[in-house]
Image (cartoon, rainbow, N blue to C red):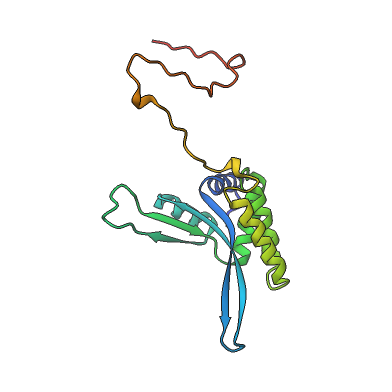
Amino acid sequence: MTDDKQKWSYLAGILDGEGYIGASINMQYDAEMKKRYRKSDLQVVIVNTSLLLMKWLIINFGGVYYTRKLSEQSMTWRDTYSWRPKGKTNKVTVLLGTLPYLLIKREQAKLGLEFLRLEGFCPDARIEVAERLYELNDSKGPRAKYRRGVSVTTNTLDTSSGVKIESDLTGDRESALPVMAVA
């Protein structure tokens, strides 16, 4: 993996905007012991439609990417790619390398590191950390204001061309810099 700080900060920006740091909890069955148990795994994923980005991630940070081909019926959607670091050591390296630069997913990265340090020990503690990650990633969680929400709708389609609609979202006009148009 690279030790270039610019590349780590770029990866952090991509992870903040296009990434996911979360844990999955699945029920498994051990046939030998004839017993069900909960298994948890940390996921660090970046999903994007750029193959160039996936190749850049592999060259600089290792890992693998998977392709999701879309059917011909969905002509407006492009194929997507999912990049993932492979193995515990690489996940730790990615989380530690991006942590100083993360803005939105900083808490998820900290919990991800905590989760990985518990591997093999305290399965109940890992489940608790996984549930805290789920709460952070949930749209109703404490950081919901940082996630994509419902788009604002306007009534501009139903108005005549002579009607001017002013936005209520003008902000602090007194402190804004004046905008000058040069012809």
Q: Position of residue 175 (x, y in %)?
A: 62, 16
Q: Is residue 14 above or below residue 32?
A: above
Which residue is at 63% across, 51% downward? Answer: 136
Q: Quadrant of the C terminus?
A: top left
Which residue occupies the extreme left position in the image? 72
Residue 60 position in % (x across, y down): 52, 54
- The front one of 142 and 6 is 142
Of 98 and 60, the residue lying toward us: 98
Residue depicted at x 52% and y 57%:
45
- On the picture, is 107 further left or further right than 176? right
Percent across and percent down for residue 70 are 33, 57
Q: Is residue 163 above or below residue 44?
A: above
In the rendered view, tell whether residue 143 sits above or below residue 126: above
The tally of labels here is: 0
* Residue found 42% across the figure and 56% down from its top: 81
| In the rendered image, the vertical position of residue 56 relative to residue 121, given as above or below | above
Left or right: 53, with 61 as reference point: left
Q: Quick one: which residue is furthest to the front in this view?
A: 158
Where, by quadrant of the figure, is residue 40 drawn? bottom right
Left or right of 131 in this view: 80: left
Quadrant in the picture for the N terminus: bottom right
Q: Residue furthest top?
A: 183
